[in-house]
Amino acid sequence: MRAYANTLPEHLAHASGGMKESMTKPFDAQRRLLLGSTTALAGLALLVPSEHANASASSTALPPAPRNGNSSNAFETIRQIETDQLSIGYAQLGPADGPVVILLHGWPHDIHSFIDVAPMLAEAGHRVIVPFLRGYGTTRLLSPDTPRNGQQAVFAQDLIALMDALRIDSAVLAGFDWGGRAANIVAAVWPDRCRALVCASGYLIGSQEANRKPLPPQGELQAWFQYYFATERGAAGYAQYRDEFNRLVWRNASPQFQFDDATYQRTARSFDNPDHVAIVLHNYRWRLGLAPGESRFDGLEAQLARRPKIAVPTITLEGDANGAPHLPPAAYANQFTGKYRHREVTGGIGHNLPQEAPGAFADAVLQVLTL
């Protein structure tokens, strides 16, 4: 497996200036790489409706974070390493021999959600790895014939493949949204690879079957974009307007997060990845049972559908102003059977918790092994 470092291309390294890189593959060609559609629309995202757990997690209110999210900082160097299917772009900070932390972003975000968290952890002596997920930034699928798969299992497999390529036996895994879900899966299924877990919005493992259960109307309203993506109009709309679309999601999911155009554009350049649209569409269509996954993941998805417990030390976090669909912590507390704490982060903190409250997120990572 080949690893090399390069300076981040100008269209990704700078928060402003220059034109967007155009998609190198026409949208229709991307769409043909989707895995198809199956049943009719029926269910919500990987918000698994469940009974509230009897044992509630402890809650610690942390100090408010600065509400100004504006920043011109960027990761100066992006390395690339190849796995069997991907060339994964990632930033690395801290000592090469330090204990490893892997930070995993969500949609519609990228590695800059951790632009302030990563240096804090590096200064504490950790080797910090911050990868672009498939479909983002400089991460590329190596073959045009590989399905542009966005089901939950593939992101966990990508994470294991990255750790193998970097010869990392075990790491603290920390993330939110798509990245948090991948970390959940690795912690549950391969606990020997996960020293500890930090995750915003808690237990995120789901299944197509669970997603057939409707939620109350307010929850469905928050997930409007998934139903839009289920249509061909939505597919074409996201391809054409993804900058405006994702900016709207930022505002809705983090209504009190104050960010300027340069801060948003620093991340938005990651959406110019040639496979971004196809992978996003497949991710949400798969959740609703409208697109099949790859058969090689059938066994793993069956295991995940049984809602495996997570036994590694864990801290979950929730912002007090999260506008994205999420469950209350009592609904998932019993999924964590090891040392566990839940923390409410106050001060108008939304869905993009590590970027909005970097101190609280970094503190959780530093403290999770001391529970």
Image: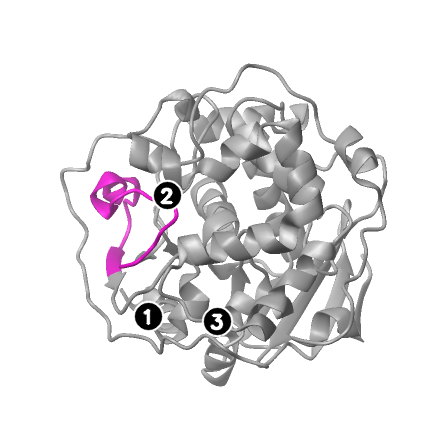
Taking 33 as reference, is 334 left or right? Answer: left
Q: Which residues are magenta?
A: 319-343
Residue at the spot 36% in from the left edge and 22% down from the top edge = 213
Residue 333 in magenta? yes
**Whole-percent x, y for residue 44 in the image:** 42, 30
Tell me: residue 325, above or below residue 90.
Answer: above
Residue 322 in magenta? yes
**Whole-percent x, y for residue 339 in the image:** 27, 55
Taking depth in this image into account, of 2 and 44 the one nearest to the observer is 44
Q: Amino acid at mark 2?
A: Pro
Q: Can you identify the residue that label 3 sits on?
A: 259
Can residue 133 be seen here? The reply is: no
Q: Amino acid at mark 3?
A: Phe
Taking 81 as reference, is 212 left or right? Answer: left
Tell me: residue 72, above or below residue 365.
Answer: below
Taking depth in this image into account, of 14 and 105 the one nearest to the observer is 14
Q: Marks 2/1: CA distance?
A: 27 Å
Q: Marks 1/3: CA distance?
A: 28 Å
Q: Can you identify the residue that label 2 sits on?
A: 325
Q: Work out whether mark 2 precedes mark 3 in sequence or the reverse, and give the earlier one.
A: 3
Task: Look at the image and tell me in which quarter the N terminus lies.
Answer: bottom right
